[in-house]
Image (cartoon, rainbow, N blue to C red):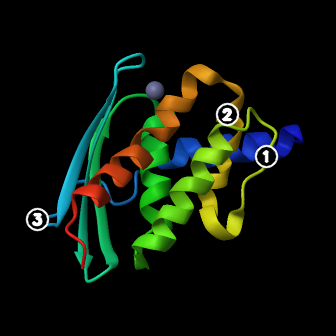
Amino acid sequence: MSSSLESLYQEVIMDHSRTPHNHGLRDGGSAESHQLNPTCGDEVTLRIHTEGDTITSLSWEGHGCAISQASASLLSDVIVDLDRAAVQERIDAFRELMRSKGTLEGDEDLLGDAVVLGGVSRYIARVKCAMLAWVALEDAMAKTPAA
Ligand code: ZN
Protein backbone atom coordinates (compact mmCIF):
# COMPACT_ATOMS: atom_id res chain seq x y z
CA MET A 1 0.00 0.00 0.00
CA SER A 2 1.37 3.44 -0.87
CA SER A 3 2.13 5.69 2.05
CA SER A 4 -0.28 8.36 0.80
CA LEU A 5 -3.13 5.85 0.73
CA GLU A 6 -2.12 4.63 4.16
CA SER A 7 -2.20 8.16 5.58
CA LEU A 8 -5.59 8.75 3.95
CA TYR A 9 -6.83 5.58 5.66
CA GLN A 10 -5.44 6.77 8.98
CA GLU A 11 -7.24 10.05 8.50
CA VAL A 12 -10.57 8.25 7.97
CA ILE A 13 -9.97 6.22 11.15
CA MET A 14 -9.16 9.37 13.16
CA ASP A 15 -12.24 11.16 11.77
CA HIS A 16 -14.50 8.29 12.82
CA SER A 17 -12.97 8.04 16.28
CA ARG A 18 -13.34 11.82 16.82
CA THR A 19 -16.83 12.08 15.34
CA PRO A 20 -18.34 8.62 15.62
CA HIS A 21 -21.44 7.81 13.58
CA ASN A 22 -24.57 6.38 15.23
CA HIS A 23 -23.03 6.92 18.67
CA GLY A 24 -25.45 6.90 21.62
CA LEU A 25 -27.86 4.03 22.20
CA ARG A 26 -31.33 4.55 20.70
CA ASP A 27 -34.44 3.68 22.74
CA GLY A 28 -36.04 0.29 22.35
CA GLY A 29 -34.35 -2.13 20.05
CA SER A 30 -34.46 -5.87 19.44
CA ALA A 31 -31.19 -6.89 21.06
CA GLU A 32 -27.92 -5.57 22.37
CA SER A 33 -24.49 -6.86 23.17
CA HIS A 34 -21.72 -5.63 25.39
CA GLN A 35 -18.19 -6.66 24.46
CA LEU A 36 -14.91 -6.10 26.25
CA ASN A 37 -11.36 -6.27 24.98
CA PRO A 38 -9.40 -6.48 28.25
CA THR A 39 -5.98 -6.47 26.62
CA CYS A 40 -6.57 -2.92 25.38
CA GLY A 41 -9.37 -1.75 27.68
CA ASP A 42 -11.89 -1.26 24.86
CA GLU A 43 -15.62 -1.56 25.48
CA VAL A 44 -18.53 -1.46 23.07
CA THR A 45 -22.24 -1.77 23.75
CA LEU A 46 -24.17 -2.16 20.53
CA ARG A 47 -27.93 -2.20 20.01
CA ILE A 48 -29.88 -3.18 16.93
CA HIS A 49 -33.45 -2.52 15.85
CA THR A 50 -34.94 -4.99 13.42
CA GLU A 51 -38.02 -5.18 11.26
CA GLY A 52 -38.66 -8.69 10.04
CA ASP A 53 -35.31 -9.92 8.84
CA THR A 54 -33.86 -6.45 8.24
CA ILE A 55 -31.65 -4.46 10.58
CA THR A 56 -33.15 -0.99 10.52
CA SER A 57 -30.87 0.69 13.04
CA LEU A 58 -27.56 0.13 14.74
CA SER A 59 -26.53 2.38 17.61
CA TRP A 60 -23.68 1.97 20.04
CA GLU A 61 -21.62 3.50 22.79
CA GLY A 62 -18.24 2.67 24.15
CA HIS A 63 -14.77 3.80 24.95
CA GLY A 64 -11.27 2.68 24.21
CA CYS A 65 -8.64 3.12 21.57
CA ALA A 66 -9.21 4.95 18.28
CA ILE A 67 -9.31 1.71 16.29
CA SER A 68 -12.05 0.10 18.39
CA GLN A 69 -14.23 3.20 18.33
CA ALA A 70 -13.66 3.96 14.65
CA SER A 71 -14.46 0.36 13.78
CA ALA A 72 -17.85 0.56 15.54
CA SER A 73 -18.59 3.81 13.72
CA LEU A 74 -17.56 2.39 10.33
CA LEU A 75 -19.58 -0.77 10.97
CA SER A 76 -22.68 1.27 11.79
CA ASP A 77 -22.50 2.88 8.33
CA VAL A 78 -22.16 -0.44 6.50
CA ILE A 79 -24.94 -2.73 7.69
CA VAL A 80 -28.14 -0.70 8.13
CA ASP A 81 -31.12 -1.72 5.99
CA LEU A 82 -29.58 -5.08 5.14
CA ASP A 83 -31.06 -8.47 5.99
CA ARG A 84 -29.33 -10.90 8.31
CA ALA A 85 -27.70 -12.96 5.56
CA ALA A 86 -26.18 -9.84 3.98
CA VAL A 87 -24.98 -8.60 7.37
CA GLN A 88 -23.40 -11.96 8.18
CA GLU A 89 -21.67 -11.92 4.79
CA ARG A 90 -20.09 -8.56 5.72
CA ILE A 91 -19.05 -9.74 9.19
CA ASP A 92 -17.42 -12.80 7.60
CA ALA A 93 -15.64 -10.64 5.01
CA PHE A 94 -14.36 -8.30 7.73
CA ARG A 95 -13.14 -11.23 9.86
CA GLU A 96 -11.32 -12.67 6.84
CA LEU A 97 -9.71 -9.27 6.23
CA MET A 98 -8.63 -9.04 9.89
CA ARG A 99 -7.08 -12.50 9.74
CA SER A 100 -5.19 -11.74 6.52
CA LYS A 101 -2.08 -10.26 8.18
CA GLY A 102 -2.08 -7.51 5.59
CA THR A 103 -2.38 -9.80 2.55
CA LEU A 104 -5.95 -8.77 1.62
CA GLU A 105 -7.17 -5.32 0.66
CA GLY A 106 -10.79 -5.95 1.57
CA ASP A 107 -13.86 -5.88 -0.64
CA GLU A 108 -15.13 -2.31 -0.73
CA ASP A 109 -18.46 -3.42 -2.23
CA LEU A 110 -19.10 -5.43 0.93
CA LEU A 111 -17.28 -3.40 3.56
CA GLY A 112 -17.51 0.19 2.34
CA ASP A 113 -15.19 2.54 4.21
CA ALA A 114 -14.45 -0.20 6.75
CA VAL A 115 -11.75 -1.45 4.35
CA VAL A 116 -9.58 1.32 5.81
CA LEU A 117 -9.11 -0.97 8.81
CA GLY A 118 -7.38 -3.59 6.64
CA GLY A 119 -3.94 -2.33 7.66
CA VAL A 120 -4.72 -3.22 11.27
CA SER A 121 -4.53 -6.91 10.34
CA ARG A 122 -0.72 -6.62 10.29
CA TYR A 123 -0.76 -5.91 14.03
CA ILE A 124 -2.07 -9.03 15.76
CA ALA A 125 -2.53 -7.20 19.07
CA ARG A 126 -4.87 -4.64 17.44
CA VAL A 127 -7.08 -7.10 15.53
CA LYS A 128 -9.24 -7.61 18.62
CA CYS A 129 -9.75 -3.83 18.84
CA ALA A 130 -11.03 -3.73 15.26
CA MET A 131 -13.16 -6.88 15.64
CA LEU A 132 -14.88 -5.83 18.87
CA ALA A 133 -17.97 -4.10 17.43
CA TRP A 134 -18.37 -6.74 14.73
CA VAL A 135 -18.38 -9.50 17.36
CA ALA A 136 -20.96 -7.46 19.29
CA LEU A 137 -23.15 -7.27 16.20
CA GLU A 138 -22.87 -11.01 15.61
CA ASP A 139 -23.84 -11.61 19.24
CA ALA A 140 -26.78 -9.16 19.07
CA MET A 141 -28.06 -10.88 15.92
CA ALA A 142 -27.83 -14.27 17.62
CA LYS A 143 -29.99 -12.87 20.45
CA THR A 144 -32.62 -11.51 18.07
CA PRO A 145 -35.54 -13.87 17.58
CA ALA A 146 -35.81 -15.09 14.00
CA ALA A 147 -38.40 -13.24 11.96
ZN1 ZN B 1 -8.00 -1.17 21.39
Q: Is residue 32 above or below residue 132?
A: below
In the picture, residue 126 is in which quadrant? top right
Residue drawn at x 75%, y 40% is 7
Q: How many marks?
A: 3
Residue 22 image point, x, y percent: 33, 60
For marks 2 and 3, give the CA distance. Answer: 34 Å
Q: Nearer the viewer, residue 81 or 74?
A: 81
First in residue order: circle 2 vs circle 1:
1
Q: Residue furthest top?
A: 39
Q: Quadrant of residue 50?
A: bottom left
Q: Nearer the viewer, mark 1 or mark 3?
A: 1
**Mark 2–mark 3 CB contact (< 8 Å):** no
Mark 1 is surrounded, within 10 Å at the Cα level, by few (under 14), some (14 to 19) or many (20 or more) other residues, namely some
Above or below residue 106? Residue 2 is above
Q: Hey, which residue is sitting farthest right in the picture?
A: 2
Per the rendering, the mark at residue 27 is: 3
Amino acid at the residue labelled 2: Ser
Mark 1 or 3, nearer chain start: 3
Task: Find disc 2 in the rendering and name its residue.
Answer: 121
Q: Residue furthest left?
A: 28
Q: Is residue 25 among the parts visible in the rendering?
A: no
